[in-house]
Amino acid sequence: MASTVVKSPRLLMLGSLALFGALSFPTHAASSEPGEEVIDEVLATGIAPPKQAPARGDEARGPFDRLLIRNAMVIAGSGAPPIGPVHIDIHGDRIVDIHSGHSAIAPEGAEIIDVDGAYVLPGFVDAHVHLGTPSHAPAGALTDPEYVLKLWLAHGVTTVRDVGAVMGLNWTLEHRERAAAGEISAPRMRVHAMFPPSTATAEQARDWVRAVRKKGADGVKFRGARPEPFAAAMEEAKRLGMKTSYHHAQLSVVQTNVLDSARLGLDSMEHWYGLPEAMFEDRVIQDYPLDYNYANEQDRFGEAGRLWLQAAAPGSDTWKNTIAELVDLDFTLSPTFTIYEANRDLMRARNADWMAEYVPPYMAGAFEADPDIHGSYFFDWTSAHEIAWKRNFERWMTFVNDYKNAGGRVVTGSDAGFIYKVYGFAYIRELELLQEAGFHPLEVIKAATLDGAELLGLDREIGTVEIGKKADLVIVDENPLANFKLLYGTGHQRLNPDTRQPERIGGVRYTIRDGIVFDAPKLLEQVRAIVARDKAALSD
């Protein structure tokens, strides 16, 4: 395809390349603090420092000495079918009993929530997030963390894995600690620092990993690296008990594909890059057009939509052997189908139900075509692009479903904040897309809860509704297994047979994290107010 001229290479590097591993900053950027390189570079352009999330307000209550949830239908998260009605007894932040019966006697002073047959699920784990993104900076603002955190909670997300800490490692870790202390309305956070892909030597890689671990990082996110420093960083991260994730960017995938990194002990691959390349049979390098430019994001994403059909076919020996080896290595797929959905249906993404009330102006501006901003690449997106991506999705979804069926771990991640994807809403869409890939709804919930907890090493604490585990719960009035649209903050529209009028139903009623009860409708109301405030300020 013909290349589009990039107007501002410096800003494009800040937005696109720094975040997703195309090119890289120097090994030691202007900041002396490892893990702060991206946000320091953005602030150098004159953008105001990122905001802090405010202290929690009346949208949150608890934790309570005793909390009794009565008359619940429970979807445990383990793959077991719903059961109920049951009563869930919570002391502080722990589930201490789950029992059935017509009534449950609570001691004096206990907080009681009678859900009257509503469904209770484990808190959701979003395994691929960014607590904001500097790629919004060219539009004049950095992401408001209050907006992001409350949208996650309003959609039942109680735990997130921030892969990259691209708003600054110190800033992200501070929010992790404030969330853990119950000071802010936020999910539990695990934070991966972004490995500098230009790191030149194995010793520099080890030094960097030790430095970010000392600062408090839970893991390392790779987005491209030379093989020697990558292997050294992996070894050091494993020695220090850190988790690892990898976006196998095209600029380094010829050197390191998914099988290469999995053999070194990588915990999870992000998206799908590096997986088709590991199954090439008649080539080594992707069939790029000769005028391709990776820095032109329409080139990058347009050609990515033709990649899966260049790999081994479903059911081939290469396909099956790749699955078998990755399963044997206890490897995790974090597909993030949702972030690529606009590529196969752009109008759907642009006009989703939540776009009007839940997207602040700086994000709306960043979503529109602009070669200076990451993920804003629909310069001339054609029917042919969408058709190619539909076929790409079919092959990709087949692999993910086959992997799950072979015993492989698949988790649920959203990567929202880019490409018309809005925090919280994108996570629920990922549940629908896993179902489209062939997952039974119970398998979808397992991917969203227990499998995510296993990836983070938290499965003894969260991931299922179980005695002894944390009180991380999602309460929704109707059965989400029958329709995941019931989990959207905008609900589901259906015809009322009595009034013969359309009505909106659904939405999460309560999200509970560590025994703290969050009022989901109130969270959504607060987010709408944030967006309305930002729009009003823009018009003044």
Image (tube, rainbow, N blue to C red):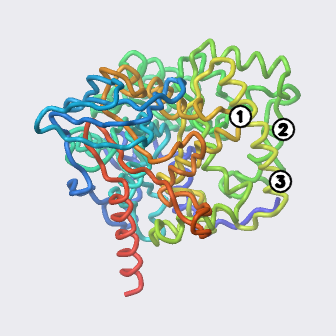
Sequence order check: which comes first, mark 1 or mark 2?
Answer: 2
Could you classify mark 3 by the number of other residues whose Cα lies within 10 Å: few (under 14), some (14-19), or many (20 or more)? some
Q: Which quadrant of the rendered structure holds the C terminus?
A: bottom left
| Residue that mark 1 sits on | 438
Sequence order check: which comes first, mark 2 or mark 3?
Answer: 2
- Report the side of 386 relative to 493 (left or right): right
Label 3: state its secondary structure: helix
Residue located at (73% from left, 30% from top):
399
Q: Nearer the viewer, residue 440 or 40?
A: 440
Report the mark closest to the observer, 1 or 2: 1
User: Residue 377 has which mark?
Assistant: none
| Residue that mark 2 sits on | 309
Vertical side of 384 occupied by 355: above or below: below
Q: Which quadrant of the rendered structure holds the N terminus?
A: bottom right
Could you classify mark 1 by the number of other residues whose Cα lies within 10 Å: few (under 14), some (14-19), or many (20 or more)? some
What is the distance, in whole Å, between disc 1 and disc 2 at their CAs?
A: 19 Å
Q: Position of residue 220 (x, y in %)?
A: 44, 31
Sequence order check: which comes first, mark 1 or mark 3?
Answer: 3
Q: Are marks 1 and 3 in contact (CB under 8 Å)?
A: no
- Give the amino acid type for the residue marked by disc 1 in the picture: Gly
- Report the side of 296 relative to 195 (left or right): right
